[in-house]
Image: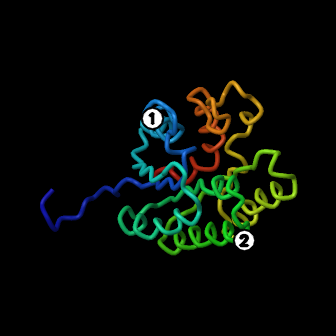
Amino acid sequence: MVSGMTNAYSAPKTLLVLGDSLSAEYGLARGTGWVALLEQRLQAQKNDTRIVNASISGETTSGGRARLPALLAKHHPAVVLIELGANDGLRGLSLAATEANLRAMGDASKKAGAQVVLVGMRMPPNYGRDYGDKFHAIYGKLAREWKAPLVPFMFEGIADQPQLFQADRMHPNAQAHPAILNNIWPQLAPLLKAK
């Protein structure tokens, strides 16, 4: 294309996935995690959404918050999917800090013109019901504030099936990832449709 000419076609949308090991294919063969499966599904549907998977194993909400401004500036995403918080919970970090970090990420994404999809997580029962309930409630509260799509629990239908987890019993195996995608897809797909 000649420099200075405008393209008659709109550029493909960009989806930024900001997550932790659950989205970074931890312990999996490359191309078998839910983000890679999403890319394959979109290609099969002739949807040219570009996916930037900025997920890092071990990431916390504070790490995601720190990295997000540069990612927004570089990729100009139309949609930001936030899948963070599990590592905060597992480390027993302050619920107020987790909520503040998630809120800052959502607000920054919206300010940059992106739509937000929030992916919720639950803590294992050994963390205590009170902590677990308060942790999980953060996601619903923020999604309501932002009027944003919420995936209530990415492990819905998976969490109680040990055969779908790796030996650490924390990370889902490749057999679980199609189900994870199916949990996320209904909230995400409407935002990726061509206009």
Q: Position of residue 29 (x, y in %)?
A: 46, 30
Q: Position of residue 162 (x, y in %)?
A: 72, 28
Residue positioned most to the bottom: 111
Residue depicted at x 13% and y 64% = 3
Q: Amino acid at mark 1?
A: Gln
Sequence-earlier tag: 1 or 2: 1
Camera-nearest residue between 56 and 79 = 56
Compared with 166, 15 (above or below) is below
Q: Amino acid at mark 2?
A: Ala
Looking at the image, residue 44 sits to the left or right of residue 135; the answer is left
Q: Position of residue 111 (x, y in %)?
A: 51, 75
Looking at the image, residue 34 sits to the left or right of residue 70; the answer is right
Q: How much space separates mark 1 and mark 2, taking CA atoms?
A: 37 Å
Quarter-of-image position of residue 138? bottom right
Residue depicted at x 57% and y 66% = 62
Q: Could you say whether the residue bearing mark 2 is in a helix, strand or loop?
A: helix
Q: Position of residue 173 (x, y in %)?
A: 59, 30
Of tags 1 and 2, the one toward the viewer is 2
Tell me the number on the disc at residue 96.
Answer: 2
Tell me the number on the disc at residue 40.
Answer: 1
